[in-house]
């Protein structure tokens, strides 16, 4: 079956874009950035209210803004961008046409309508229920309806992705196995199907409850199934941004995976175990057995943590091997010193890898440890952790990828390259600091989702220690710095699309060029045949491990001093 | 460019490991097992493990039980808030009702004594965040969670609600004394 479409090959990157897929990737990516912009403006309201000295918004506005900020960032920005990444990893990397472009546009329309309906419900008031919308606290029915429409659209998008894989296989546009990056995207899409199905299973009854069709949704069951959606959607992010790390290592350094088997094996561990992590949110809940909590919260004996620790080594390791092959072999770190630090695609990803591991990864294991969760649950430590994973990990990675896509996909010269060069450092490093002080405040017990830590006017007000106020002030300051970093990203990307110099995108052709195979890997012909190929990365990994072990046992020490509980 | 190209060796699962990767996988695996068994270890030897004892309940039933219990053990009334101050005996039950937007009543416990603390909510989800010790437990309506607590330091404690429960959420703060 032949479908009338054209392909162009980008002269700079050599990537081949199919006309329908290209438009869909652009539409999804642009929608994503719009929601990032909205979420970023809302972030300013949240930050300037939680900064105790500023305490800007009124309580009702604050809770409304916080609800919208969570949903726009964690769901709409990220999933729109992920759908773009999925289409890219299927159609562009496998050099085939996208399956059922009309249905893909339907998916896009549903997602967009859903996102707008949900946002409207929140701004109208009456739906300030936070992203989690725990029953029996109810939002307006259109709040749930919007989320359901968005989820259905995203689910269709995942199936368009799977369909595109089938098209590529059938049309034989590549030989052998799919590339590692596509393999990672498949991981993300499989996790997405599970996630979105869980969302539907709990949001549809809740929507019916809001319409009065049914009269009860159990609060504990809601929490359990909602988190299979809420937490797992962050697992889509992990799989997606790790794939993008490999992609960036490949396009910036020409890096090969150190070992296909190891990297793919680690993605497989994600598929098998990563979902169990939604149990992290239920560790302080009644009604669940200890065995259930321990097995699930540990991703069945930490196999998904193992996978992340593997990716954390193999992505920079692949960069190191590629750099050493170029002759940067002096000492442990010449390869890293000579990396293209002024290329925002590289610097963004590298800042993301380090921050995701050291800040997001370690703190995630703390919160996910059954007993340690008691000294962290629902404190502001929790948003400290997930800003390290979702903002430093996913958002910064997606920003870095955008810089790569502006000339190749959008066919524009980047405006203000100087600002773009600065952006990952400003955004990434101020987010590092933001996450650290937020976790510091959380360690002192400061609550998340709380308008007034001073409890003004309350007879039994609790007085937080001065250090907690200091930390929350620093949260505010670093948040503002990060928001400026985010604004630069929006300015550079949107500005490039609007005013950037058009560049030649490659002539359209009706025939697709076949996908070349990777040159045979020289890295290893047998176990260890290359010696110790990435010693610098290994030392970094050991530093990570030592930090992890120390911080882990410091937390146990802290726990051992609190009241006895049994 | 290569992680974005199909691997040359068709049988990628036979692709040999590098020594750096092999070593790291072994180290990371051992650490993951330590992480896992630490939770089990703490259940056997640690003193801070959250009870799983839970009963289904209703707002009316829980409130009736808590009021009957408070009538028995109330020692005085707090002058500022008007809340009863209730001092249960060692080993006995203690109740805290969470509702929009207060915790009821004020408990007066003794250091080193053990209590069966019953937590439930009459309406939405609430958070039981005991400060400054920083113990945090989710309070879910319809479920009565019985947590055994042994205070190890005397003083005045606050209970802060740290689960969002509507527009008055930030005014929801209670008190607890340990003698």
Image (spheres, rainbow, N blue to C red):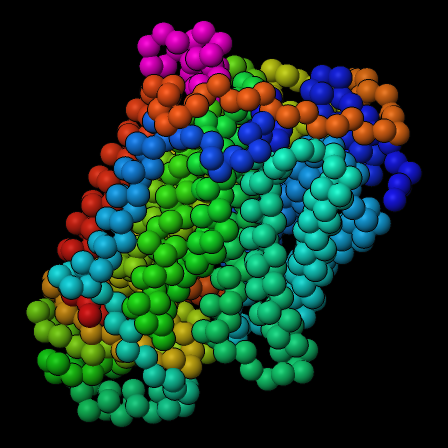
Q: How many marks?
A: 0
Q: Position of residue A239 (x, y in %)?
A: 53, 43
Q: With B70 as the anchor, is A213 left or right in this view?
A: right
Q: Residue A374 falls in which quadrant of the image?
A: bottom left
Q: Specify the quadrant of the image occupied by residue A523.
A: top left
Q: From the image, which quarter does the N terminus of chain A lie in?
A: top right
Q: Nearer the viewer, residue A413 or A380?
A: A413
* Residue A332 is inside the magenta segment: yes
Q: Is residue A163 above or below residue A398?
A: below
In this view of the protein, which residue sits in the foreground, A108 or B118? A108
Q: Is residue A564 left or right of residue A233?
A: left
Q: Quick check: A242 above or below B134?
A: above
Look at 78% across and 23% down and name the residue there. Answer: A9
Looking at the picture, does residue B174 appear above or below residue A218?
above
Residue at (15% x, 60% y) in the render: B46
Residue positioned 81% across, 26% down in the render: A8
Placement of the C terminus of chain A among the 4 image quadrants: bottom left
Q: Residue at x 81, y 29 (%)?
A: A512
Q: Is residue A202 visible?
A: yes
Position of residue A251 measured from the top left corner of the image (x, y, whole percent): 60, 22
Residue A332: % across, % down: 33, 14
Query: Quarter of the image holding residue A127?
Result: bottom right
Q: Nearer the viewer, residue A171 or A286?
A: A171
> From where the camera sits, is residue A62 visible?
no
Does the magenta run of residues contain A555? no
Frontmost residue, A173 versus A131: A173
Answer with left or right where residue B167 lies relative to residue A307. Answer: right
Residue furthest right as drawn: A4
Spot the residue most to the left.
Answer: B112
Q: Position of residue A288 (x, y in %)?
A: 36, 72
Q: Which residues are magenta?
A: A319-339
């Amino acid at each position: 079956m032949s479908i009338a479409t054209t392909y162009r090959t980008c002269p700079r990157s050599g990537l081949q874009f199919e006309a329908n897929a290209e438009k869909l990737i652009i539409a999804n990516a642009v929608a994503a950035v719009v929601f990032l912009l909205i979420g970023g403006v809302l972030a300013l309201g949240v930050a300037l209210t939680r900064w105790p000295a500023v305490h800007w918004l009124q309580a009702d506005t604050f809770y409304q803004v916080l609800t919208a900020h969570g949903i726009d960032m964690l769901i709409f920005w990220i999933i729109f961008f992920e759908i773009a990444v999925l289409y890219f990893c299927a159609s562009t990397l496998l050099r085939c046409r996208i399956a059922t472009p009309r249905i893909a546009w339907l998916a896009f329309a549903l997602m967009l309508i859903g996102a707008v309906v949900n946002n409207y419900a929140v701004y109208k008031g009456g739906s300030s229920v936070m992203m989690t919308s725990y029953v029996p606290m109810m939002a307006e029915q259109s709040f749930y309806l919007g989320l359901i429409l968005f989820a259905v659209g995203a689910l269709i998008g995942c199936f368009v992705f799977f369909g595109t894989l089938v098209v590529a296989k059938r049309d034989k546009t590549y030989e052998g196995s799919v590339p590692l990056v596509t393999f990672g995207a498949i991981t993300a899409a499989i996790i997405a199907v599970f996630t979105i199905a869980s969302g539907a299973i709990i949001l549809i009854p809740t929507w019916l409850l809001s319409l009065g069709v049914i009269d009860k949704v159990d609060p504990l069951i809601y929490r359990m199934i909602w988190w299979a959606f809420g937490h797992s959607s962050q697992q889509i992010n992990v799989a997606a941004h790790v794939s993008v790390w490999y992609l960036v290592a490949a396009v910036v350094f020409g890096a090969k995976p150190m070992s296909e088997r190891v990297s793919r094996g680690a993605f497989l561990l994600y598929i098998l175990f990563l979902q169990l992590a939604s149990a992290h949110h239920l560790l302080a809940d009644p009604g669940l057995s200890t065995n259930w909590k321990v097995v699930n919260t540990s991703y069945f004996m930490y196999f998904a943590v193992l996978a992340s620790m593997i990716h954390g080594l193999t992505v920079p390791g692949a960069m190191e091997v590629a750099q050493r092959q170029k002759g940067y072999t002096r000492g442990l770190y010449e390869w890293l010193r000579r990396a293209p630090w002024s290329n925002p695609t590289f610097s963004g990803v590298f800042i993301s890898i380090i921050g995701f591991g050291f800040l997001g990864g370690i703190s995630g294991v703390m919160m996910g440890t059954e007993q340690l969760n008691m000294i962290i649950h629902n404190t502001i430590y929790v948003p400290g952790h997930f800003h390290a994973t979702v903002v430093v990990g996913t958002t910064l990675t997606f920003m870095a990828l955008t810089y790569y896509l502006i000339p190749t996909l959008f066919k524009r010269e980047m405006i203000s390259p100087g600002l773009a060069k600065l952006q990952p450092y400003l955004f990434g490093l101020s987010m590092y600091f933001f996450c650290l002080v937020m976790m510091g405040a959380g360690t002192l017990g400061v609550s998340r989702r709380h308008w007034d830590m001073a409890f003004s006017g309350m007879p039994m007000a609790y007085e937080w220690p001065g250090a907690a106020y200091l930390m929350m002030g620093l949260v505010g300051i670093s948040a503002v710095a990060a928001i400026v970093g985010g604004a630069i990203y929006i300015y550079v990307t949107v500005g490039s699309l609007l005013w950037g110099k058009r560049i030649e995108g490659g002539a359209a052709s009706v025939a697709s060029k076949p996908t070349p195979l990777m040159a045979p890997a020289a890295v290893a012909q047998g176990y260890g045949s290359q010696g110790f190929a990435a010693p610098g990365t290994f030392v970094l990994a050991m530093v990570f491990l030592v930090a992890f072990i120390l911080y882990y046992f410091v937390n146990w020490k802290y726990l051992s001093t609190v009241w006895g509980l049994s | 460019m290569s992680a974005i190209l199909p691997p040359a060796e068709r049988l990628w699962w036979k692709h040999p490991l590098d020594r750096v990767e092999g070593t790291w996988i072994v180290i990371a695996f051992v650490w993951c097992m330590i992480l896992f068994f630490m939770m089990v270890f703490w259940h056997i030897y640690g003193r801070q493990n959250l009870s799983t004892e839970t009963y289904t309940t209703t707002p009316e039933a829980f409130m009736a039980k808590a009021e009957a219990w408070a009538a028995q053990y109330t020692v005085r009334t707090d002058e500022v808030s008007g809340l009863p101050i209730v001092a249960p005996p060692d080993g006995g039950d203690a109740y805290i009702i969470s509702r929009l937007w207060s915790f009821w009543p004020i408990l007066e416990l003794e250091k080193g004594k053990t209590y069966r603390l019953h937590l439930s909510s009459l309406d939405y989800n609430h958070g039981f965040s005991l400060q400054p010790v920083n113990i945090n437990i989710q309070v879910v309506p319809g479920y009565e969670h019985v947590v055994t607590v042994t205070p190890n330091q005397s003083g005045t404690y606050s209970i802060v609600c740290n689960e969002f429960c509507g527009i008055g959420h930030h005014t929801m703060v209670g008190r607890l004394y340990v003698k």
